[in-house]
Image (cartoon, grey):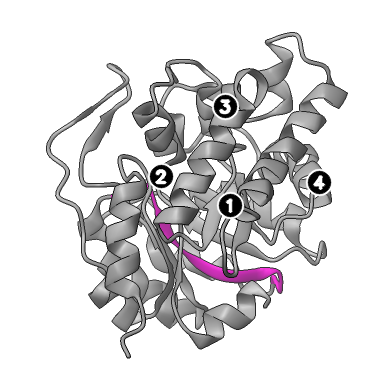
Amino acid sequence: MELVQALARGVVVLDGGLSTALEQAGHDLSDSLWSARLLLSAPDAVRAAHLAFYRAGAEVAITASYQASFAGFADRGIDRDGTARLLRSSVALARSAASDVDGQRWVAASVGPYGAVLADGSEYRGRYGLSRRELAEFHRPRIEVLCSAGPDVLAAETIPDVDEAVAVLDVVRGSGMATWLSYSVRGDRTCAGQPLEEAFAAVSGVDEVIAVGVNCCAPEDVAGAVEVARRVTGLPVVVYPNSGETWDARERSWTGGGTGFSAGAWVEGGARLVGGCCRTGPEAIGVLAQELAPRA
């Protein structure tokens, strides 16, 4: 079944924070490549993390390509062909993990923001000083490689800025590749400060977009975003917030207590792709999958 068909029939459960699962398994991700480093050094660990989420009840695994880029891997001495192989492997690892579980499973190829490559917290600010054309030129090569690997959907995620969203959509438009677009937000605005009405309206006319929403945000910011996304676009809404803790980019650590979240109200409002982001591991996704399971 195509993912679009599944969304028309009901809610689809996403995985949680891949980095969280990897850290829980004992891997050190204090590196500018973050989880993408393990595509190079420990691919079996990436596959195992995807499998843990699938077994917990996730129906979609998001690949380890969020912070992967040609520039980032070039800094490690990896040429363009090598980087392309690593990007394609991110999809293959998730697909391989899906083969170990029963039932329908999908793979979402992660397209993180330009700021993630800087590894300085810029993905929570946006406004990088780059033009829309420059941003499109950054995103295009890896999007083309990820599409060639055959994912079910592209996950353009944690996008902080409408300008960057439009740049990504410029690349996606006409590709025929199903895509969801999710922003990082604070309250009723993107992290760059634009109103969510403007942010969600950016997908108008891009037939490839199958869902729009938010991720890597506070759970309390989700309900309002669901309402705006549904009203502005009429599309299924994708939501996968953090646990409730706050990322300190300077200290590179999480602070505060994770409150967890209940997704029932989001689903009632129109959310159809629901999961977790940072600090939500397989156990949390298991709880979420049970909450969202169809009742007889």
Is the residue under label 4 in contact with that under label 2 (CB below 8 Å)?
no
Q: Is residue 159 visible?
A: no
Looking at the rendered structure, the secondary structure element under dot 3 is helix
Q: Which residue is mark 1?
A: 156
| Real-space CA distance between mark 2 and mark 4, rounded to the nearest whole angstrom | 26 Å
211 is within the stretch colored magenta: yes
Q: Position of residue 203 (x, y in %)?
A: 60, 68
Q: Which residue is mark 3?
A: 117
Task: Give me the residue at 61% from left, 62% from top.
Answer: 106
Mark 1 or 2, closer to the camera:
1
Q: Which residue is mark 2?
A: 192
Give the magenta range: 206-217
How packed is label 2: few (under 14 Cα within 10 Å), some, or many (20 or more)? many
Which image quarter holds the C terminus? bottom left
Q: Nearer the viewer, residue 80 or 91?
A: 91
Total marks in image = 4
Looking at the rendered structure, the secondary structure element under dot 1 is strand
Q: Amino acid at mark 4?
A: Glu
